[in-house]
Amino acid sequence: MLKRKLQQQSAAMDEIKPKATTLPGAINSELFAQPFWMRFYEIECMLNKQLATLERPTSIKCTYNPVEYAASLHCAYLRRYLNGQKRVMFIGMNPGPNGMGQTGVPFGNVRTVRDIMQLTGEVLQPPEVHHKRPIAGLNCRTEEPSGVRLWELFKHLADGSLDTFSQQCFVYNFCPLAFFDEAGHNITPSELKGEFKRQIRDMCLDALDKLLNLVQPQIVVAVGDYVHTALKKSSFFGQSSVSIVRLAHPSPRSLNNTNWAEKATLFLQQHNLIKFMRNQA
């Protein structure tokens, strides 16, 4: 299984890797040719290799990693929206079954990824597929409610443009894995148990510290309690100039969350974040 994962990842990397250009009188170096988003992706790939060594508990039937099997779409997202350092990073928990699990894009419900972001790319299959959790990629007909809520609000607050939003902001997920039990129920990282839960948190946090040091955000918005708690252990926030705030998760599973967009807008106003979303800071 691990061999197959690494083969998929290597094939995707070969497909998206830019060709180095040789200029007269210049030293041809892959280091100089490597774009910012690819430096980010290489850290993700190192995390994927670590996560693949873990032995999952018997309560988890299948584990999906869309950063691997949807690498083409995931990298299209990075290539378009991560061209350099950002002032604000929004960090969610992990892939939703019908969002990033299908598209490789954080909170990436199909309509947003296909029609608004206009991203394209091949989506392969996880090494092991739960029969109740099929992967259809951009052909998935079920929308991820959290993704619909989050991206529609961010687009609205950025004056209708995710390109404007991405000038200073970036959306990401703490953990690249989705977990399913025998019945196909979605098990979030906060619902994992014991040593496996700690291993997932620690590996993902170590990788996130590296990513944060690359992106250098001034403000990190933890989307939900799990991420906010995990980030309290991050070494990145030892810098006095960096702040972390908690935004309620958009999932309908959360209690009293029917008017999430209104509450989130008020939160973003109170923390003076909308100016970054509109590229006006």
Image: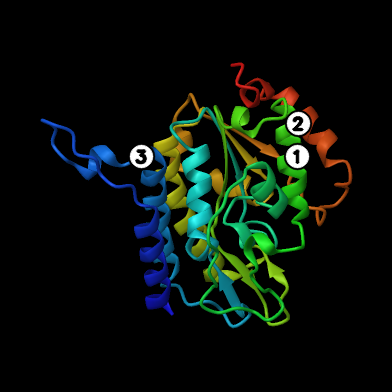
User: Where does residue 161 sit, x and y in percent of width and height?
Assistant: 67, 30
Mark 1 sits on what residue? 152
Label 3 crowd bin: few (<14), some (14–19), many (20+), radius 10 Å? some
Label 1–label 3 contact, CB within 8 A: no
In the image, is 29 to the left or to the right of 161?
left
User: Where does residue 142 sit, x and y in percent of width and height?
Assistant: 77, 62
User: Where does residue 192 sit, x and y in percent of width and height?
Assistant: 63, 68
Q: Amino acid at mark 2?
A: His
Q: Which of the 4 image quadrants contains residue 168?
A: top right
Label 1 crowd bin: few (<14), some (14–19), many (20+), radius 10 Å? some
SS for dot 2: helix
Q: Residue at x 75, y 31 (%)?
A: 156
Q: Can residue 70 be spotted in the picture? A: yes
Label 3–label 2 contact, CB within 8 A: no
| First in residue order: circle 3 vs circle 2 | 3
Q: Amino acid at mark 3?
A: Pro
Q: Residue furthest front?
A: 24
Between 201 and 218, the residue placed more toward the observer is 218
Mark 3 sits on what residue? 35
Q: Residue furthest left?
A: 25
Q: Residue at x 64, y 49 (%)?
A: 113
Between 254 and 4, the residue placed more toward the observer is 4
Mark 2 sits on what residue? 156
Label 2–label 1 contact, CB within 8 A: yes
**Residue 161 sits above or below residue 186 on the image:** above
SS for dot 3: loop
Q: Residue at x 53, y 54 (%)?
A: 73
Q: Residue at x 53, y 56 (%)?
A: 121
Q: Residue furthest top?
A: 281
In the image, is 145 to the left or to the right of 75?
right
User: Where does residue 218 sit, x and y in percent of width and height?
Assistant: 51, 27
